[in-house]
Image (tube, coloured by chain):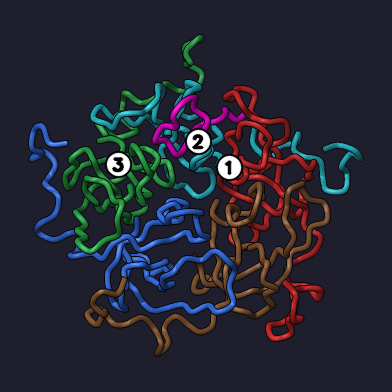
Chain colours: A red, B cyan, C green, D brown, E blue
Amino acid sequence: MLRAVVTGNVWSTRRIDGLPSGAFLEVEVAGGGSRLVAFDVLGSGVGESVLVVQGSVAAAWFPGTPPPVDALIIGSIDAPGDDGEAALPAGSRIPGRR
Amino acid sequence: MLRAVVTGNVWSTRRIDGLPSGAFLEVEVAGGGSRLVAFDVLGSGVGESVLVVQGSVAAAWFPGTPPPVDALIIGSIDAPGDDGEAALPAGSRIPGRR
Amino acid sequence: MLRAVVTGNVWSTRRIDGLPSGAFLEVEVAGGGSRLVAFDVLGSGVGESVLVVQGSVAAAWFPGTPPPVDALIIGSIDAPGDDGEAALPAGSRIPGRR
Amino acid sequence: MLRAVVTGNVWSTRRIDGLPSGAFLEVEVAGGGSRLVAFDVLGSGVGESVLVVQGSVAAAWFPGTPPPVDALIIGSIDAPGDDGEAALPAGSRIPGRR
Amino acid sequence: MLRAVVTGNVWSTRRIDGLPSGAFLEVEVAGGGSRLVAFDVLGSGVGESVLVVQGSVAAAWFPGTPPPVDALIIGSIDAPGDDGEAALPAGSRIPGRR
């Protein structure tokens, strides 16, 4: 998955059949600055940090026939990945935790 | 998906079996300037901004046996992604909207 | 798909089972200069401009069990994508054309 | 697969249905420095070197319906890839070894 | 596929279920210098030039349930792709050759 920030909507009136209900949002990938367009069913807004899944698993999430969608926002990110509540340091894993 | 602009046609007379009806269009990806060839069934023209889906979901869109196509134009883009009608700012989401 | 030019053969005597009949050709991707190895069933030659499909759809083209092949030459390119016979300019689309 | 080092957690409270139990960990890919978010079921910790698989095979690992996950930590790396216990030099392969 | 040279082993004792028998080898991609980890069933050695297939077709090669593997060494390369026994020049194709 990629962390990204929503930068805007992409509107397409003339389009192929089979696209699901939802929005096409342009997002900027964290770090690199590259942009892609992801499908959104969560009502994400401009400036929001999101988690984007890519490839056929994005399409497979939809019920029924997979739509021609190769990027999907799967969640809104609560906090940066490097904050204090981050993963436990290596070596401090709790035995039995899976 | 990627935003791209159509830059021309790619013609191939000698080719493998199983390719569907439509056009191979060369497109330039917005931002980076990299180019790829996408299949088009919408009659897109040179200079047109389009939305391109990549990978196996492009092939899966076609009825019957998926053709050897890994990029498909799924729509013509109405307006830039950063215009005034863009997504709602974070925090202004309508409760209950999905 | 990617436009590329064939630059040579790749020979592999010691290899895994399940590879189909045909040639492994090294190609240089147009524009970037990056190289990859694509499977060829068309008898493409060095210096020839070809269209390459990547990913699982390349393997799915083969009859029977999909082979471990992730890039396939699907056609020989007749002419550059930016020539005079290119796609119609945006706005000149013929009504009813699909 | 990619070698990477875990750099933190990514938390997402508002998210789509169908995500499995486990953690979203941000990892930094060895060498390039690019970052991605991988799903973890091993309890990996910050600073740990891990092996990450990408694409639909990450989702296919989960039992039942494949979740919308395109990167999965498949193991914790014991040692660097260029150490003394590395693969045998070419030419020293044991006959009959498969 | 990618041409690459084996640079070492990657060892992982603590790992998820479902990984097949064989070795995880780190390889350096020809040209760019980027590195990835590929699964090997051929007994490839350090310094050996190999051909690597990526994505779901790598996993699909294995019998039974596809393992969480996204890169597989499919062959050892006999000779450089630009040597004298390379593909025929364009225009010298033998009629009737497929």
The image position of residue D93, as x and y in percent, is 26, 79
| Numbered circle sitting on residue B58 | 2
What amino acid type is highlighted by mark number 2? Ala
Label 1 is placed on what type of residue? Asp
Q: Tell me which residue sits at (31%, 70%) in the image.
A: D98
Distance, label 3 to label 1, CA atoms, is 23 Å
Outermost residue, right direction? B95
| Residue B27 painted magenta | no
- Left or right of C41 on screen, residue B41: right
Do tag 2 and tag 3 residues touch (Cβ < 8 Å)? Answer: no
Q: Chain of mark 2?
A: B
Q: Are marks 3 and 1 on the same chain?
A: no
Q: Which residues are magenta?
A: B60-77
Judge whether C12 appears above or below E37 on screen: above
Q: Secondary structure at mark 3?
A: strand
The residue that label 1 is drawn on is A70
Please tell me which residue is depicted at 43% across the width and 55% down the height of the picture.
E63
Q: Residue at x 37, y 43 (%)?
A: C65
Q: Is residue C83 above or below residue A31?
A: above
Residues tagged 2 and 1 counted as in contact (Cβ below 8 A): yes
Q: Residue C13 or C31: which is nearer the viewer?
A: C13
> What secondary structure is found at the residue carrying circle 1?
loop
Dividing the picture into quadrants, the one containing residue C52 is top left
- Which amino acid type is shown beneath numbered disc 3? Ile
Q: Work out whether D98 lies above or below A20.
A: below
